[in-house]
């Protein structure tokens, strides 16, 4: 007897028991259930929620691997300086870099999945329903949107809050109005702001060394992990351009949240999700347009002389409009967060509006919030709240247009063959 058959027998044996949902989760994760329908014709498809989630995870795996190397690269570059003749194979893809990724990034993934799935199992057992697979993607997203030195206990507390308050209180997967991963990120930002912003949280050991120096240690070198947006918020673009090139920004050899630095890999992941029809290309394109429009407006404000170099907003306002897409978490948020099918707009026209304002507001928050020059997660959460309203007015507008067409429709009389009346109007 094979393992699949044995597990199916165990499933039937313990059917209806208290822990049945937990067992069924493991069973269906490993194998397709050995069940067939017994009545009627059913639509047959190879995709389901679990396979959809796994497709998104596949798009995130390259970013996770890159982030593990980048964690070590940023640490050693901060200690020893960036190499003059940079080589990917010689300076980036090294065991020393990867080891720091193993030590710092993998535990974040383990805690995120362990705590989040435990909460899912507990609620499934209590409510007596099957374990929902919605957290499979959330569990991978969470460690990619936090700083590398985020304490594990802090992440665990945030995951509990995000899963319980952000999803389960609304009824579970498919019922939540806010993106659970961004709810977790927002909780971390507002509950532990010193761990989520500043120049000491984006590079491994930067905060620890700073605390040691403040405590009086004299044999410890300080590490500065300022991000590109941090430099711009301080109107220090000269130092930023001297340290990072456009290619560094695009390929991701810069400090930042664990998985948000490589615009190149995020672009590839976005194309993969569009090709597999998992994510909405309308939301992605409209969000890009919105961010470019807001960036262009700020560039024009600077060119017209309305904001001078002495203004605290000058650095981010004068930043080339298109570069906003390759720094910070904007690209990551657009591809993997804004396209969440549960919390985003459902209508095609609504997706254009929803995505546009995500990009537009993200750049706006970047400029006007110099204490934390990143706004994509706040913009997405805000638009999550307004997504149902957008869809409501889009649908109401469609109904009004159809009623108007119906009023103006011409009813043709019966012909000689006695055919039924024909409505000369578009039907939908």
Image (tube, grey):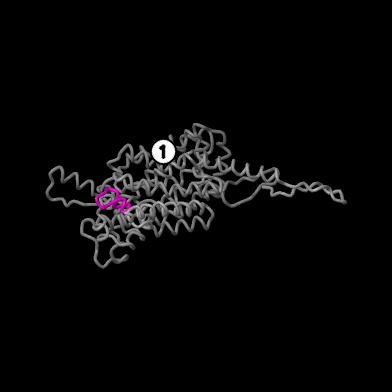
- Residue 72 colored in magenta in the image: no
Secondary structure under the numbered disc 1 in the rendered image: helix
Q: Is residue 289 left or right of residue 75?
A: right
Determine the main secondary structure of the stretch shown in magenta.
loop
Q: What percent of the width, then of the height, locates residue 423?
A: 75, 47
Residue 123 spot, x, y in % from top left: 47, 34
Is residue 106 visible to the viewer in this orientation of the structure? yes
Question: Foreground: 156 or 13?
Answer: 156
Q: Position of residue 272 (x, y in %)?
A: 49, 58
Q: Which residue is mark 1?
A: 162
> Does 82 sit left or right of 339 as displayed?
left
Residue at 24% from the left image edge and 54% from the top image edge: 236
Q: Residues within 10 Å of mark 1 (few under 14, many from 20)?
A: many
* Residue segment shown in magenta: 305-317
Residue ranking furthest to the bottom: 85
Eyeballing the image, is 179 above or below 237?
above
Q: Nearer the viewer, residue 4 or 126?
A: 126
Locate residue 278 relative to residue 210 in the image: left or right. Answer: right
- Residue at image point 39% right, 48% down: 362
């Amino acid at each position: 007897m094979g393992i699949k058959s044995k597990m199916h027998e165990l499933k039937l044996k313990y059917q209806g028991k208290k822990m049945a949902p937990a067992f069924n989760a493991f069973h269906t994760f490993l194998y397709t259930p050995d069940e067939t329908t017994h009545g009627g014709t059913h639509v047959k498809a190879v995709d389901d929620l679990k396979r959809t989630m796994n497709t998104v995870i596949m798009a995130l795996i390259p970013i996770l691997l890159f982030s593990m190397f980048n964690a070590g690269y940023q640490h050693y570059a901060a200690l020893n300086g960036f190499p003059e003749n940079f080589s990917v194979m010689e300076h980036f893809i090294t065991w020393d870099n990867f080891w720091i990724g193993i030590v710092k990034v993998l535990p974040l993934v383990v805690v995120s999945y362990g705590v989040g799935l435990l909460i899912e199992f507990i609620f499934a057992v209590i409510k007596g329903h099957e374990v929902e697979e919605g957290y499979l993607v959330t569990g991978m997203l969470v460690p990619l949107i936090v700083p590398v030195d985020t304490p594990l206990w802090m992440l665990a507390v945030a995951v509990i809050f995000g899963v319980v308050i952000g999803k389960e209180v609304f009824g579970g997967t498919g019922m939540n109005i806010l993106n659970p991963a961004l709810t977790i990120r927002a909780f971390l930002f507002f509950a532990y702001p010193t761990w989520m912003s500043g120049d000491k949280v984006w590079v491994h050991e930067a905060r620890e060394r700073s605390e040691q120096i403040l405590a009086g240690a004299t044999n410890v070198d300080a590490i500065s992990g300022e991000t590109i947006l941090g430099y711009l918020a301080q109107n220090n673009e000269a130092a930023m351009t001297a340290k990072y090139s456009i290619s560094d920004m695009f390929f991701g050899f810069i400090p930042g949240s664990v998985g948000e630095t490589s615009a190149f890999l995020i672009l590839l992941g976005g194309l993969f999700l569009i090709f597999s029809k998992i994510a909405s290309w309308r939301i992605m394109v409209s969000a890009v347009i919105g961010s470019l429009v807001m960036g262009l407006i700020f560039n024009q404000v600077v060119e017209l002389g309305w904001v001078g170099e002495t203004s605290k907003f000058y650095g981010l306002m004068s930043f080339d409009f298109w570069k906003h897409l390759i720094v910070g978490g904007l690209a990551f948020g657009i591809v993997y967060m804004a396209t969440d099918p549960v919390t985003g707009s459902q209508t095609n026209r609504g997706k254009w509006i929803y995505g546009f304002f995500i990009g537009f507001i993200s750049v706006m928050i970047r400029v006007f919030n110099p204490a934390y020059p990143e706004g994509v997660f706040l913009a997405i959460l805000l638009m999550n709240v307004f997504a149902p309203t957008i869809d409501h007015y889009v649908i109401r507008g469609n109904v009004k247009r159809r009623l108007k067409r119906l009023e103006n429709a011409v009813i043709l009389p019966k012909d000689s063959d006695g055919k039924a009346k024909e409505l000369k109007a578009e039907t939908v």
